[in-house]
Amino acid sequence: MVSRPQHSFTRKPNLADLKAAGHDMLRLVNRRILLSILSDRQPISRAEIAKISGLNKATISTITGELLKDLCIIEEGSGRTTPIGGKPPTPLRLNSKRFGLFGLDIRADETILALSDFNNRIVARVSYETGSEPTAFLNKIGKEMRKLRTKHDSFIEFPGIGVSLPGVVDNHTGKFLLSVVLPWRDVPVVHLLEKATSLPVIIDNSARCSALAEIWHGKTQYAHVRNLLYVSVSTGLACGIVIDGGLYRGGNNTAGQFGHIPIDLNGNECRCGQRGCWDLYASDKATLKRYAELRRTNGKRISTMRKLVELVDAGDQAATEAVRETARYLGIGITGLINGLDPEVVVIGGEITKVWGLIEPFIVEETKRNLLAPRSHSVPIRPSAFEVRPSLKGALTLIQNSLLSVPHMG
């Protein structure tokens, strides 16, 4: 029987709140607080952990002793001598070999399987063409994971597999329900992978995985951010929402499908069946279509956003105009989301961000013109912290999140 990670622990801890709440925390919560602090601040001494967490020295000593015994952390060696000549602190850090984390990033065309250590360093990465028959494909992936476990047997434990999927998922049943880009329907991904690997599996959609990666591993400027909106621009358009440090999934696990909110009721029919969806104007598919229409006279065809970005860098006027128009539509949609969700920061991910200097002014111009609250004009809009596959980093983070996150303390 596969032992699944605890899904009730969904938030990155708010270190600013720990002093007030830390002294009464249960043993498990205290362990996770310490592990999370180590993950963010390592190497770090016991005294520094006590200062950040508000836990007393005896509690810190007890918990670090348990974590050392469980091989979750290691002592790095002697620290620097203190100014008054006392005993030097001994820095602690996570034991990178304690856990091997599997991440699987499934897209319509390509799937990437990665294995990382407990310190988020990827030690293995393999890509595959995504199979049209999900059962056979996931069984194949399961075999590859078993091979990687054998090859990387220096890890003490493999706690699970995080899976990023390009569409609507049901986290409770473990099913991938549907997608406008991948022709899989009602696929029991969790069941199939758990059966193939005997490891627990957590799934989520790519936009939410990307948002989770940003909040856990983004630039240091996100260290105190608790509310974040992630806009994933790829073949389709979707969003991930972080509220108070945790992913917001909604009542039926479908939150974030803002790409299918109509912005033009008289627009063309979308792949989802509605008309005038934001996806039709701001996705990579929309940008490529716009470029094809602008270059119709000479019949030049571009099939990927990566190639289109290269043309922008080369000074192609049609490619530049196509991307600018997409940026305007991104700004229009993001304006509505800022008005409705009031995030602290908006992060945009996708190939289009590689020409950030071109698109940022148009996105910002649209938001400044249409935002309701004056203070919202200062909401920063930034490109993803990850240049390549933030959804893959997010898939790995699903498992790390299950090991380090703590309940909301309010």
Image: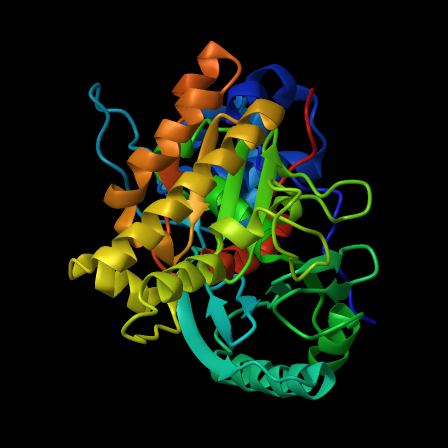
Q: Where's residue 211, x and y in %?
A: 53, 45
Residue at far left of view: 314
Residue depicted at 61% across the width and 55% down the height? 268
Give the residue drawn at x 69%, y 79%: 197
Q: Is residue 51 visible?
A: no
The answer to whether residue 182 is above or below residue 47 is: below
Residue 313: x and y, percent? Answer: 19, 58
Front-most of residues 256 and 298: 298
For the image shown, how many numbered marks are present on the structure?
0
x and y percentages locating residue 81 in the rendered image? 22, 31
Q: What's the residue at 52%, 76% (across, down)? A: 109
Foreground residue among 87 and 145: 145
Q: Is residue 151 above or below residue 236?
A: below
Q: Residue at x 46, y 79 (%)?
A: 127
Please provide percent x and percent y for residue 221. Answer: 36, 31
Query: Could you tell whether 303 is left or right of 194 in the image?
Result: left
Horizontal side, residue 310 vs residue 17: left or right = left
Residue 204 shows in the view: yes
Check the image and report above or below for 215 versus 179. above
Q: Nearer the viewer, residue 349 or 62?
A: 349
